[in-house]
Amino acid sequence: MKEMLRHSGVIKISGNDFVKYMTEKVVTFMDSSPEQRKERKGKQKKQEPAIYSNRWFGILPFAVKMFMKKTD
């Protein structure tokens, strides 16, 4: 992946390199056993904290706006 360029947080990569990378990832995934996949998935869930306030923050301003319109 010689042609990889980092520009403003975006990685630009040629089409052939991307296909090669994705093929390697798929083959690695398919070669792993189902037990290994379940274990990896369980580890990822444990590492990611459930932040419900962040998930709901996007709708809260909308809900407040609707509530204010309704009371007028």
Image (cartoon, grey):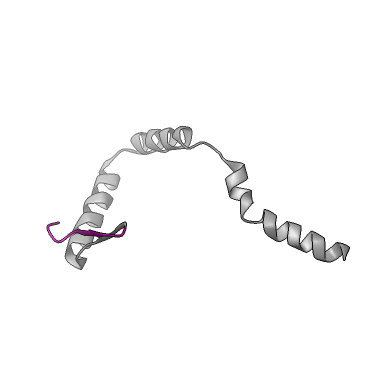
Quarter containing the N terminus: bottom left
Lateral position of residue 55 relative to residue 21, left or right: right
Furthest residue in direction right, as rendered: 72
Residue occupying the point 74% across, 62% down: 65
- Front residue of 33 and 17: 17
Residue occupying the point 44% across, 34% down: 47
- Front residue of 40 and 47: 47
- Front residue of 63 and 29: 63
Residue 70 image point, x, y percent: 85, 64
Q: Quadrant of residue 61?
A: bottom right
Residue occupying the point 77% across, 63% down: 66
Q: Is residue 2 above or below residue 55?
A: below
Q: Is residue 54 above or below residue 46?
A: below
Q: In this view, does 49 lie above or below 29?
A: above
Q: In this view, does 28 lie above or below 8?
A: above
Lateral position of residue 58 relative to residue 34, left or right: right
Quarter containing the C terminus: bottom right
Residue occupying the point 59% across, 49% down: 55
Furthest residue in direction left, as rendered: 2
In the image, is residue 56 part of the stretch drawn in magenta?
Answer: no
Residue 67 image point, x, y percent: 80, 59
Residue 18 image point, x, y percent: 22, 61
Range shown magenta: 1-8
- Front residue of 36 and 19: 19
Lateral position of residue 32 relative to residue 50, left or right: left
Q: In which quarter of the image is residue 62?
A: bottom right
Q: Quadrant of residue 41?
A: top left
Prevailing secondary structure class for the magenta stretch in the rendered image: loop
